[in-house]
Amino acid sequence: MNEKMKILEMVEQGQISPEEAAKLLKALDQAASSTPVITPQKAKTLRMFKVYVLSHDGDKVNIQIPLEFAKLAMAKGNGKNIVFNNSKLGNLDIDLDWDMIQDLIEQGATGNLVDIETNDGDIVKISIE
């Protein structure tokens, strides 16, 4: 039973006067209006920067890193290195505009950002999930 109903029952039973009940009801209303409403925050979901590369020679890269790490690497000019560094894939004849990819990420883009398949059979896919 809520507080207002208890106060009304106390008046009905003669335990308090109507004037006392009015004061109590007013105090309850003031307390309710001054109580801050707390809304639970949504848990941040970790978005992933995903890169999949398959060369026609059979070399394969499958990268999944947190988006914030990818942003940091791209800001330092290492976006291409995330994908091609220390692999034979640096010889692929694919020219990606890393500045454009970084701009898409900064704008909050999600899903497939790049989906390339060359005549040689090279495949490059970049997505944000």
Image (cartoon, rainbow, N blue to C red):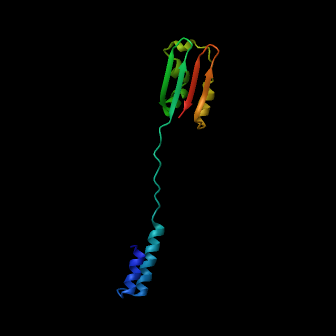
In the current view of this chain or complex, which residue is farthest to the right? 119
In the current view of this chain or complex, which residue is farthest to the left? 15
* Residue at (42, 76) in percent of width and height: 4
Question: In which quarter of the view is residue 115 placed?
Answer: top right
Please provide percent x and percent y for residue 93: 62, 14
Q: In this figure, what is the number of numbered marks? A: 0
Please provide percent x and percent y for residue 108: 58, 38
Please provide percent x and percent y for residue 90: 55, 14
Question: In which quarter of the view is residue 80 placed?
Answer: top right
Q: Is residue 94 left or right of residue 49?
A: right
* Residue at (53, 25) in percent of width and height: 51
Please provide percent x and percent y for residue 68: 50, 33
* Residue at (45, 65) in percent of width and height: 35
Q: Quadrant of the N terminus?
A: bottom left
Question: In which quarter of the view is residue 32 placed?
Answer: bottom left
Q: Is residue 110 above or below residue 12?
A: above
Q: Is residue 67 above or below residue 95?
A: below
Which is nearer the eye, 116 or 48?
A: 116
Which is nearer the eye, 53 or 28?
A: 53
Q: Is residue 72 left or right of residue 119?
A: left
Q: Is residue 29 above or below residue 73?
A: below
Q: Is residue 38 left or right of residue 109?
A: left
* Residue at (47, 41) in percent of width and height: 45
